[in-house]
Image (tube, grey):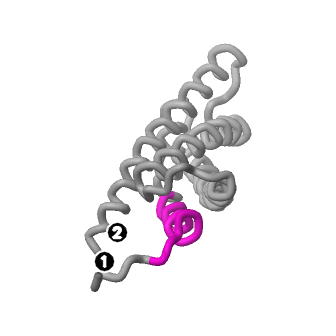
């Protein structure tokens, strides 16, 4: 693996870390509001899934822009790449939702922070799949030869 690829993975990880933190914060915020004002159960599957969807839409757009500009140096972004990024991220997101609901089933949390933490675990786990899609399909360019 080249030094350039290692740096790219590191940058993707940093962007993903920021996105994961932001995602967990948004999920926690939405679950807390829902619980405080609408008396929604923050550990309920539909409530947690709804909050996760809203957080994903927001964070996916932010991550796309950061990855296009900094990780893959593919600026300015294009609508085609944005569509591909959202599609790739959607596949990882489906995996994330399945894992989140499995964790909710196994652990049965009762507080917003517990559910947000489980969501962060699911987001981080889906990051590998997301990197592979982004690297190979969305921003995929033929890797430069190490001999040049």
Query: Residue 98 location in percent, x, y?
Result: 64, 57
Packing grade of label 2 (10 A; few <14, some 14-19, many >=20) is few
What secondary structure predominates along the stretch shown in magenta?
helix
Quick one: 27 or 142, which is closer to the camera? 142
- Asked if residue 139 lies in the magenta stretch, the reply is yes
Instruction: Write down the region rendered in magenta.
Output: 127-142
Can residue 55 be seen in this snapshot? yes
Q: Residue furthest bottom?
A: 147
Residue 139 versus residue 129: which sits nearer the camera?
Answer: 139
Check disc 2 and report its element: helix, strand or loop: helix
Badge 1 density bin: few <14, some 14–19, many ≥20, Cα 10 Å: few
Where 18 sits versus 86, above or below?
above
Distance of mark 1 from mark 2, alpha carbons?
A: 6 Å
> Which residue is identified by label 2?
5
Q: Is residue 131 magenta?
A: yes
Task: Say what secondary structure mark 1 lies in.
Answer: loop
Labelled disc at residue 53: none
Residue highlighted by disc 1: 1
Q: Is residue 140 above or below residue 102?
A: below
The x and y percentages for residue 135 are 49, 67
């Amino acid at each position: 693996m080249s030094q350039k690829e290692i740096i790219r993975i590191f940058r993707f990880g940093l962007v993903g870390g920021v996105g994961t933190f932001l995602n967990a914060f948004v999920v926690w915020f939405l679950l807390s509001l829902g619980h405080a004002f609408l008396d929604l159960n923050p550990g309920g599957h539909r409530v947690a899934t709804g909050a996760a969807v809203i957080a994903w839409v927001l964070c996916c757009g932010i991550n796309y822009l950061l990855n296009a500009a900094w990780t893959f140096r593919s600026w300015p972004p294009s609508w085609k790449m944005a569509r591909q990024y959202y599609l790739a991220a959607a596949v990882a997101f489906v995996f994330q939702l399945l894992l989140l609901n499995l964790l909710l089933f196994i652990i049965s949390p009762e507080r917003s922070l517990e559910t947000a933490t489980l969501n962060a675990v699911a987001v981080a786990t889906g990051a590998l799949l997301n990197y592979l899609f982004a690297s190979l399909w969305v921003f995929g360019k033929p890797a430069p030869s190490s001999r040049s």
